[in-house]
């Protein structure tokens, strides 16, 4: 080991350790997604075993969603102030505790607490992910890495939709929850051993890799940065003041509304009518999510490739979000027309659902990367707020859609609202989403 490496604690040879961090992040998001799906699918056997009414299922699912919404913003604030390492550890412990408690519960109140704990844990994960990506990867890698990590969400949902019913039927719902909790806890030693909040503090990272990340500074540069941070008063977190952040948050809310609307319509209106004898019936529950996984990765890949070749965030971020929104709107319009006529085959409707969900979520890594681009000091807090707004819009989607459908008496009316929101998002992005200007402020 040369004297410089010994003094700094950095690896003496060129490394690519940040890609190991990507794999660790992907594995945790996948494990928690599977655990979240496990407790959601275990609610029906829990209600049957405890002789509770089916109406309580909505209350328990609301506990999962409410925990997610409540935890997102505080987790983001903690990540920006103290780093993602402890937030990930806390999230893992909360999810594991919720799964263990859920597997032991025999009362509605206990199961509700378990759902809240799992919701708190899952709500803290994505803000911690964006903080980790901002700290460990260069600006030209942010969207690609976020797409790679966030692809675990739809992939986990697809795998859980296909396999979790069989696992629960074979092992029982309680052992399934306990097994998921042990899987989450088994990840913790890997995380604590490999991850540091500052890549410069890791002995597995070389100077050349730090330079690629953009975290290698001379002593003089570090002192100047510290003086500037002390001299400049810390700005308050303003989510709606910059126009670009407002447009980004609007796009997050539209994404949540469209995703929940489409997924719930698929689950309630189409899946029950697919014949069990059909080959489609075995694949349909997880197919939209399995198709969405490569599309969410592709969105991040295209965005960063455009940033490397063009150099402008407007072309790299805004253009990809716009394309995703427009293509998703076209798919949703086709789905609305097909649902209104009632003529197309179930295979055609499932194909439209797969296209719509995949195109909707393909903008997610680009939206998250834009937050890092324009809010370098507090990306986790901004994402936490955006996630809470997106989840709130998603929760409102079925309620508003049902109300509109009942008032108008026409099955296509909720789709018209959805299409109007999508088109409004296109206008907002065209007029207000200017990340190059926002990043230079």
Image (spheres, helix red, strand yellow):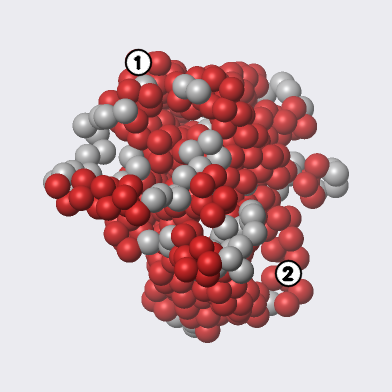
- Residue 403's quadrant in the figure? top left
**Residue occupying the point 47% across, 65% down:** 8
Foreground of the two, 14 or 230: 14
Q: Is 155 on the left-hand or right-hand side of 374? A: right
Residue 31: x %, y % from top left: 61, 64
Q: Earlier in the sequence, mark 1 or mark 2?
A: 2
Tell me the quadrant of the picture where the N terminus can be found. bottom right
From the top left corner, tell me how far across and down residue 410 is, in percent.
49, 23
- Residue ID at (38%, 24%): 436
CA gap, disc 1 to disc 2? 49 Å
Disc sitting over residue 431 in the figure: 1
The tag on residue 73 is none
Near mark 2 (Cα within 10 A), the count class, few <14, some 14-19 or many ≥20, is some
Residue displayed at 70% across by 45% down: 290
The vertical placement of 41 against 239, above or below, is below
Q: Is residue 107 above or below residue 158?
A: below
State the image coordinates of residue 321 (x, y, percent, origin top left).
Answer: 50, 26
Report the residue that reaches farthest toward the front.
3
Name the residue carrying label 2.
167
Local packing at callout 1 (Cα closer than 10 Å; few below 14, some 14-19, many 20+) is: few
């Amino acid at each position: 080991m040369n004297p410089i490496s010994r003094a700094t604690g950095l690896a003496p040879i060129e490394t690519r350790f940040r890609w190991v961090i990507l794999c660790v992040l992907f594995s945790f998001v996948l494990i928690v997604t599977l655990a979240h799906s496990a407790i959601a699918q275990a609610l029906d056997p829990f209600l049957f075993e405890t002789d509770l009414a089916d109406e309580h299922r909505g209350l328990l699912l609301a506990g999962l969603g409410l925990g997610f919404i409540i935890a997102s913003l505080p987790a983001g604030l903690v990540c920006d102030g103290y780093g993602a390492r402890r937030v990930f550890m806390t999230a893992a412990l909360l999810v594991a505790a919720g799964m263990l408690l859920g597997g032991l519960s025999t009362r509605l109140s206990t199961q509700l607490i378990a759902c809240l704990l799992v919701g708190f844990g899952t709500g803290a994960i994505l803000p911690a992910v964006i903080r980790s990506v901002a700290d460990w990867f260069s600006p030209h890698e942010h969207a690609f890495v976020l797409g790679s990590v966030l692809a675990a969400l739809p992939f986990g949902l697809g795998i859980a939709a296909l396999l979790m019913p069989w696992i629960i039927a074979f092992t029982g719902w309680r052992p399934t929850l306990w097994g998921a909790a042990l899987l989450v806890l088994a990840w913790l030693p890997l995380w604590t051993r490999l991850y540091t909040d500052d890549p410069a503090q890791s002995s597995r990272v070389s100077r050349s890799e730090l330079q690629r990340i953009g975290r290698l500074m001379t002593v003089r540069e570090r002192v100047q940065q510290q003086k500037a941070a002390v001299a400049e008063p810390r700005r308050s977190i303003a989510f709606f003041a910059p126009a670009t952040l407002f447009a980004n948050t609007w796009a997050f809310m539209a994404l949540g509304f469209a995703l929940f609307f489409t997924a719930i319509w698929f689950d309630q209106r189409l899946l029950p009518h697919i014949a069990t004898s059909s080959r489609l019936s075995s694949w349909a529950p997880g197919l939209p999510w399995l198709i969405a996984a490569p599309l969410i990765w592709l969105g991040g890949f295209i965005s960063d490739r455009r940033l490397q070749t063009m150099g402008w965030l407007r072309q790299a971020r805004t253009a990809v979000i716009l394309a995703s929104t427009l293509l998703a709107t076209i798919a949703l319009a086709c789905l609305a027309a097909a649902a209104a006529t009632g003529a197309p085959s179930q295979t055609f409707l499932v194909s439209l659902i797969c296209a719509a969900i995949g195109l909707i979520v393909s903008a997610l890594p680009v939206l998250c990367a834009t937050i890092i681009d324009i809010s370098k000091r507090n990306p986790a807090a901004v994402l936490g707020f955006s996630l809470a707004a997106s989840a709130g819009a998603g929760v409102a989607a079925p309620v508003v859609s049902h109300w509109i459908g009942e008032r108008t008496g026409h099955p296509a009316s909720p789709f018209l609202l959805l299409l109007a929101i999508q088109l409004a998002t296109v206008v907002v992005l065209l007029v207000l989403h200017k990340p190059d200007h926002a990043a230079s402020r």
